[in-house]
Image (spheres, rainbow, N blue to C red):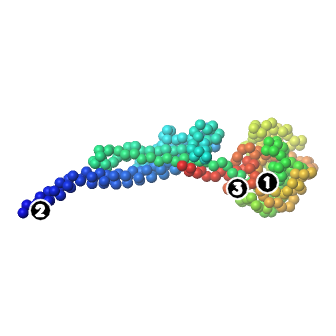
């Protein structure tokens, strides 16, 4: 009659013997779940920090410093396991992304650095049941991400432009070096000529004046739009150029070389000369006729094919119609990321910067 009690004792013994296994299994389930949540949080912080910092990479030492600082600030706005996240100098690595190798070249020169790698971790996550079952007080989790800044693309759309246009055949006629050395003039017409330009309509003198005052008044313009062209003095616009040059804050860039001497009868005083009125101008495709003989007449309508960066540096507002003039300098060497979209056909200093990508 004592047999049932004996069997119960055996069950109790088995339960006692299996308790560590039960606790161990529970520890694994509970603590691994916690670890997974924290790992997900750390990965999110790494992604956010890498994307934020990469936006600042511009090929300069200052850009590197801004990238690191911005990545740290972005991380600090997030929490991991209930605490504000923090990344340290050792958590950040910069370099040039090499797609063929799928790795970061940390020895790349500063001007080639286009990527920021962020590695974050927590090696002191308190355990719960694992502490009892395995005497493990802590566990670890980590996250890592590499942000890549794609190269600039030629802009296909912009929202701000000077009301001037040049023909795309200039880019066939001249090398890049030559194109940056020639002087463009609005009047009189010539092979190095520029003209007044407006998308969707004829560029009247009043429009050109207003667009010089507010470069965004014409809205967004893009490759494929029709460009109305106009030669001539456009006196009110020429006078506006003078007014804008007197108050502009930009100056002739020494990298462009020595500024040409003031033209005879320049409206700019000796103290004012050296100031520039800079912005994107229209590049249109009107065929080779605009670059042959006396150049195009800059009348009618032609398709917009891209944008170039130009600096107006001299203006004459007095004299006969052929003496009134505007002189421009092209600078296609430096990328200005003012485009709203990429995919343009003219890579001439007006670009669009694609957003950073996560490559790892």
**Disc 3 packing (10 Å; few <14; some 14–19; many ≥20):** some
Are discs 2 and 1 less than 8 Å apart at CB? no
**Where in the figure is residue 111, as x and y percent of width and height?**
65, 39
**Where in the figure is residue 101, as x and y percent of width and height?**
59, 45
Q: Which mark is residue 343?
A: 3
**Where in the figure is residue 28, as x and y percent of width and height?**
33, 52
On the rendered image, what quadrant is the N terminus found in? Answer: bottom left
Precedes in sequence: disc 3 or disc 1: 1
Q: Which mark is residue 4?
A: 2
Q: Residue furthest left?
A: 1
Precedes in sequence: disc 3 or disc 2: 2
Name the residue at 61% across, 46% down. Answer: 100
Q: Is residue 31 left or right of residue 116?
A: left
Between residue 28 and residue 175, name the one nearer to us. 28
Q: Which residue is mark 1?
A: 283
Q: Is residue 114 left or right of residue 226?
A: left
Q: Is residue 232 above or below residue 269?
A: below
Q: Is residue 339 left or right of residue 80?
A: right
Q: Quadrant of residue 301?
A: bottom right
Q: Is residue 144 left or right of residue 58?
A: left
Q: Is residue 6 above or below residue 88?
A: below
Q: Nearer the viewer, mark 3 or mark 2?
A: 2
Label 2 sits on a secondary structure element that is: helix
Between residue 46 and residue 236, name the one nearer to us. 46
Q: Nearer the viewer, mark 3 or mark 1?
A: 3
């Amino acid at each position: 009659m004592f047999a049932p009690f004996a069997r119960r004792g055996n069950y109790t013994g088995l339960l006692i013997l299996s308790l560590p296994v039960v606790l161990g299994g529970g520890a694994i389930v509970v603590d691994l779940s916690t670890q997974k949540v924290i790992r997900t949080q750390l990965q999110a912080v790494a992604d956010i920090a890498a994307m934020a910092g990469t936006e600042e990479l511009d090929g300069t030492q200052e850009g590197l410093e801004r990238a690191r600082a911005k990545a740290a600030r972005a991380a600090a706005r997030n929490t991991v396991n209930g605490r504000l996240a923090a990344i340290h100098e050792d958590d950040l690595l910069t370099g040039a992304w090499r797609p063929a190798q799928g790795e970061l070249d940390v020895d790349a020169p500063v001007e080639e650095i286009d990527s920021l790698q962020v590695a974050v971790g927590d090696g002191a996550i308190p355990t719960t049941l694992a502490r009892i079952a395995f005497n493990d007080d802590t566990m670890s989790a980590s996250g890592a991400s590499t942000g890549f800044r794609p190269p600039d693309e030629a802009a296909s759309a912009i929202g701000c432009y000077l009301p001037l246009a040049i023909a795309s055949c200039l880019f066939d006629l001249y090398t890049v070096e030559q194109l940056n050395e020639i002087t463009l003039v609005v009047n009189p017409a010539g092979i190095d000529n520029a003209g007044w330009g407006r998308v969707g309509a004829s560029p009247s003198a009043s429009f050109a004046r207003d667009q010089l005052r507010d470069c965004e008044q014409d809205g967004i313009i893009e490759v494929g739009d029709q460009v109305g062209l106009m030669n001539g003095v456009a006196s009110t616009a020429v006078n506006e150029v003078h007014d804008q040059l007197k108050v502009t804050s930009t100056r002739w860039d020494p990298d462009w070389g020595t500024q040409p001497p003031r033209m005879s009868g320049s409206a700019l005083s000796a103290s004012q000369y050296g100031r520039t009125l800079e912005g994107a101008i229209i590049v249109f495709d009107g065929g080779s006729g605009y670059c042959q003989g006396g150049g195009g007449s800059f009348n009618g309508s032609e398709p917009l094919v891209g944008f170039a960066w130009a600096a107006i540096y001299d203006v004459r507002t007095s004299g006969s119609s052929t003496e009134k003039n505007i002189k421009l300098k092209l600078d296609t060497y430096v990328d200005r990321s003012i485009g709203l979209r990429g995919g343009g056909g003219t890579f001439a200093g007006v670009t669009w910067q694609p957003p950073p990508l996560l490559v790892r």
